[in-house]
Amino acid sequence: MDTTTPTAGVNFIRNLIDDDLASGRQRTVVTRFPPEPNGYLHIGHAKSICLNFGLALHYSGRCHLRFDDTNPVKEEQEYIDAIKADVRWLGFDWGAHEYYASDYFERLYAFAERLIEKELAYVCDLNAEQIREYRGTLTEPGRESPYRSRSVAENLDLLRRMRAGEFADGTRVLRAKVDMTSPNLNLRDPVLYRILHATHHRTGDAWCLYPMYDFAHGQSDSLEGITHSICTLEFEAHRPLYDWLCEALEIYHPRQIEFARLNLTYTVMSKRRLLELVNERRVAGWDDPRMPTLSGMRRRGYPAAAIRTFCERIGVGKSDSIIDMSVLEDCVREELDHTVPRAMGVLRPLKVVITNYPEGEGEQFTVPNHPKDSSLGTRSLPFGRELYIERDDFMEDPPGKYFRLAPGREVRLRYAYLIRCDEVVKDPASGEVVELRCSYDPATGGGATPDGRKVKGIIHWVAAANAVPAAVHLYDRLFSVANPTADKTGDYRDLLNPASLEILGEALLEPMLAAAAPGSCFQFERLGYFCVDPESVSGQPCFNRTVTLRDSWAKVAGVES
RNA sequence: AGGGGCGUCGCCAAGCGGUAAGGCACCGGAUUUUGAUUCCGGCAUUCCCAGGUUCGAUCCCUGGCGCCCCUGCCA
């Protein structure tokens, strides 16, 4: 956590908690992260996780992991497993505090009977459509259900028979008796329980009656002694109901606090849409490196520490916002720059022959693995007469500020020699440049420049003799517009970036990279950060580009073209 | 004349009556065997608008304007 600025980590929620602690309203802080296991976690969840677990850490309290599993038709064990793995990977530990709303089903049911006994709930026989009609509209009050005044005995009998499975799905619900004329629609006798003859991933067929969010979430919070129940803005209108239920049930009453959910440019952040992308095969899966999911980012090579820094940096507020992707990328680069070893890799190879270098010979240069952190050690880099350089590092007719290789020009081969381009060999048929014939200055080995001559261009390279062939996946933004869901009349899927994935099959890497372990990350000098794909096989590695390096040349070149 | 919430630099975000923090982005410039990193410097006389209270208002009051959320037996 950044402690260099006095306001780091401070937000309105911290202020509210400080007040609660100072006034004696609370003595400790207990938060919870309450995912529904119906999809994979994304960076928006990371904001909530960092907030809730971060608060617990800051106040020496605790944070529970609670699965909000009240809708069996959408939830699966697969999601539970993935969510736990993601939270752990992000660096948080819920200890023994792993809970499930479904573990409270019996107690929740008892709460329902208590509400009926207090004449604050009733079984309603209206169907879904009728309930909607009776609810009224935003500007007109609703009407009371004809079943609203059933006796306690009848309600209890009906609810018990509902639980016993006597009635079909949709035929009856349990409703809270609040106020059908409330301007807050959530208070117009909200549904508390619905009949669902569905098998639950944890409770099996024990129940055919399942509580709604409003009758499960706050009650679970209460049972667990949550002091601050932090959720996103769309639940603000539910808070009066949250409060009403705690009062009606006369149970411990946590405080609900709402904050703005995270939005990021060039991506989408709803589980519904992410599920669509997965199901419609527009991406390779939940962990596709282009996805804003934690599993996707992990596969992409984003370090967990970078995501934590990001969540700290963006702050917590109540205004709808959309964070620029560059903020996240900056966090990723910062983390990787400090921690990751450098390597040489050529993505789009162009053959270079050093004509004055002795044939059949070679040498090894000992080079540092990190320019500033010597603790990362050194490695040996082979050099020889035949090399490969990046195609982008040669231009036959370069523009003004280009200072890489061109006919007659001299550049430094990083950590090796100065070379001059003497001749350009082209494919006679296509005119494509296929080889460069260069000469080197033997006095400039290992970076030396005895005569002090100024050579601005430094390019990366790989010796042909022992280059490792590799596949490289280049990832770019998933969508081609900053806010793909802004236009409500269009389909966000039409805005997918067709160039979000580019597969390079002919990259050549330095020998050391052949043995790189899956998941390990490197900076390919001058190109960006790359990590070994988890499904990569040894000897024929597959690298994912995590993020490019900042490229001020690209800006200049872009302006000139 | 439904209710709730929000409006401080291009994007986030501090600020809580005493005269606009910070980050990202952007623009310079220095160092550099990565056009990277690092480092220096620039970047809101102004806080949605209009009135009012006050010696003094981004912070208080009044009235506008704009955006978001709520009419699932989803969460």
Image (cartoon, coloured by chain):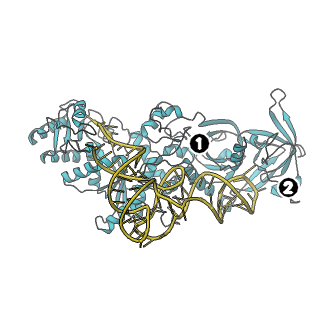
Chain colours: A cyan, B yellow
Q: Is label 1 or label 2 in front?
A: 2
Dot 2 amino acid type: Thr
Q: Residue at x 25, y 30 (%)?
A: A129
Residue A151 in the image: state x and y as whole percent.
9, 40
Q: Is residue A127 above or below residue A337?
A: above
User: Which element is circle 2 on?
Assistant: helix
Dot 1 amino acid type: Asp
- In this figure, which residue is indicated by the disc labeled 1? A533
Q: Is residue A559 above or below residue B57?
A: above
Q: CA distance from mark 1 to mark 2?
A: 37 Å
Viewer-closest of A356 and A493: A493
The reply to whether residue A51 is visible in this rendering is: yes
* Apparent side of residue A272 relative to residue A429 in the rendered image (left or right): left
Mark linked to residue A444 = 2
> Is the residue marked by circle 2 packed among few (<14), some (14-19), or many (20+) residues within 10 Å?
some
Residue A15 in the image: state x and y as whole percent.
38, 63
Viewer-closest of B30 and A87: B30
Residue A506 in the image: state x and y as whole percent.
70, 36
Output the chain of dot 1.
A
Q: Which residue is situated farthest in the top direction here?
A: A429
Q: Quadrant of residue A75?
A: top left
* Apparent side of residue A147 relative to residue A431 in the rendered image (left or right): left
User: Which element is circle 1 on?
Assistant: loop
